[in-house]
Image: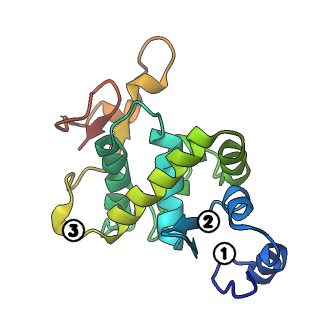
Amino acid sequence: MSELRFMLSKDKQKYYDRLSGADKESLEKEYPRVSLENGALVSIPEDEYWLAKMIFWEARDAKLDDKAREAVGWVARNRRENPFGKWGTTYQDVVTDPGQFSPYLARDTNDSLLIKEIQKNPTEKKAWDNCIRIAKDVVNAPESSNPLPDIFYFHSPNAYNGPVRYQSWMLDMDIVRVEGIDPCDFEFFR
């Protein structure tokens, strides 16, 4: 573990000091920016980390198909690549833009909640690892593989208990149905 040489956060030395004697399992539980890939401990690149967090909070439900999670990730990528920079130029800017994605409505980074979820439930840990994989795929995919070009919004009717709530921003937009994604799970808008 003394060979641990990767960026975990802006406060690298603090983390390095705390991690130098830890085992791999406790590292993954305590620091969601650390992942075990093919038996090697790796840090999650910043863009992939922020996108994985958004996918986790918006679409981690076990009953969802990965296609829905990928589509949610592509919405964030579309926003990041928007030539006008309306939502920001990094994934962190995009997913924490106030009022955009429900987990970040108050620009809360949710790190402590994410860590608690991963620590207390192996199912959540598995969901997190899956979200990391999907985020990596979306971040690194060529633009030509974008299944949702020019789609910048989504809504999850199933996220509400009771009657479906529609937001005012939806009124002047066209709903785009995505094959293989139940519109009760996610609706996409142009």
Q: Amino acid at mark 1?
A: Leu
The x, y position of residue 157, in whole percent, is 39, 25
The x, y position of residue 69, in whole percent, is 37, 45
Q: Secondary structure at mark 1?
A: loop
Q: What residue do we see at 20% from left, 35% from top?
A: 180
In front of the other: label 1 or label 3? 1
Q: Mark 2 — residue?
A: 33
Q: Mark 1 — residue?
A: 8
How is the structure coloured here?
rainbow
Q: What residue do we see at 82% from left, 75% from top?
A: 21
Q: Amino acid at mark 2?
A: Arg
C-beta proximity under 8 Å, tags 1 and 2: yes
Estimate how packed mark 3 is, as few (under 14), some (14 to 19) or many (20 or more) residues with alpha carbons within 10 Å.
some
The correct choice, above or below, for 30 with respect to 181 in the image is: below
- Between discs 3 and 2, the one toward the N terminus: 2
The correct choice, above or below, for 101 with respect to 174 in the image is: below
The x, y position of residue 47, in whole percent, is 48, 69
Is residue 136 shown left or right of residue 26?
left
Q: Secondary structure at mark 2?
A: loop
In front of the other: label 3 or label 2? 2
